[in-house]
Amino acid sequence: MERQGVDQAIARRVRERREQLGWSLERLAGLSGVSRAMISRIERAENSATAALLSKLCFGLGITLSSLMADAERPPHSVVRRTQQRSWRDPETGYGRRMVSPAQTGSAVEIAEVDLPAGARVSYEAPPFLAYDQHILVLAGRLMLTFGNEKLHLSAGDCVHMTLESGATFENCTAREVRYLVVLKTEPRPGAALLGREERLPRHAC
């Protein structure tokens, strides 16, 4: 899909999710750490959001990046062909993400293929509402993961299980592209049930 089409789909999904929750731009800005002006531009598809910005928006909205990229209007098929799989590329780092698993199936598991260009680096903060349980399988190249002060080097064929309890940084320190699969499952973060209930109720219900 062309870049403009992906940006418009993301814009629609962000706006629909925010309106579904009954939130104003100011409320989402406060929960996500993304400015009201930037969210407004993203919702109007005037800006191609970076991976870092989309990650913060997803954390604030309580959804995954994969579900944000899924087409809300696509019927629930159990098979999605390679030519139909949605892809997205970060305009800042060149990070690319392709949704491998079919959308709208009701499955708690999502699969995405990521390509990280030479020298690229993408960081994710710990999500406030969702607990991430994921496996990373390196398909080609070498990937470096950083958790706080710990660095983990992975080569093709290596697989690691991880969460985002303290955030993580994905980095390609080599001169060649690295490709890896992300097999992801999310659930409400333990201990955040009351916070989630309070924050996610539509404004008129508070």
Image (spheres, grey):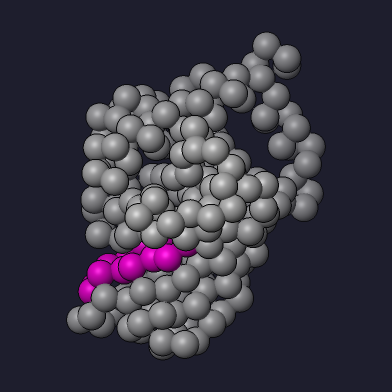
Q: Is residue 2 above or below residue 39?
A: below
Query: Whole-percent x and y of residue 62?
Result: 60, 41
**Viewer can see residue 151:** no
Q: Nearer the viewer, residue 26 or 15?
A: 15
Q: Nearer the viewer, residue 206 or 13?
A: 13
Q: Residue at x 74, y 45 (%)?
A: 192
Answer whether residue 120 is magenta in the image: yes
Q: Seen from this angle, which residue lies furthest top?
A: 204
Horizontal side of 149 relative to 121 (left or right) equals right
Q: Residue at x 60, y 19 (%)?
A: 22
Query: Whole-percent x and y of residue 188?
Result: 72, 48
Answer whether residue 200 is magenta in the image: no
Query: Whole-percent x and y of residue 71?
Result: 46, 39
The residues colored magenta run 112-126
Q: Residue at x 79, y 37 (%)?
A: 194
Q: Which quadrant would residue 159 be assigned to in this image?
A: bottom right
Q: Which quadrant would residue 200 be assigned to in this image?
A: top right
**Viewer can see residue 31:** yes
Horizontal side of 52 relative to 188 (left or right) equals left
Q: Seen from this angle, which residue lies furthest left?
A: 175
Q: Is residue 30 above or below residue 135?
A: above
| Dominant secondary structure (helix, strand or loop) of the stretch shown in magenta | strand
Q: Residue at x 54, y 21 (%)?
A: 19
Counting labels gives: 0
Q: Which quadrant would residue 198 be assigned to in this image?
A: top right
Horizontal side of 63 relative to 123 (left or right) equals right
Quadrant where the C terminus is found in the figure:
top right
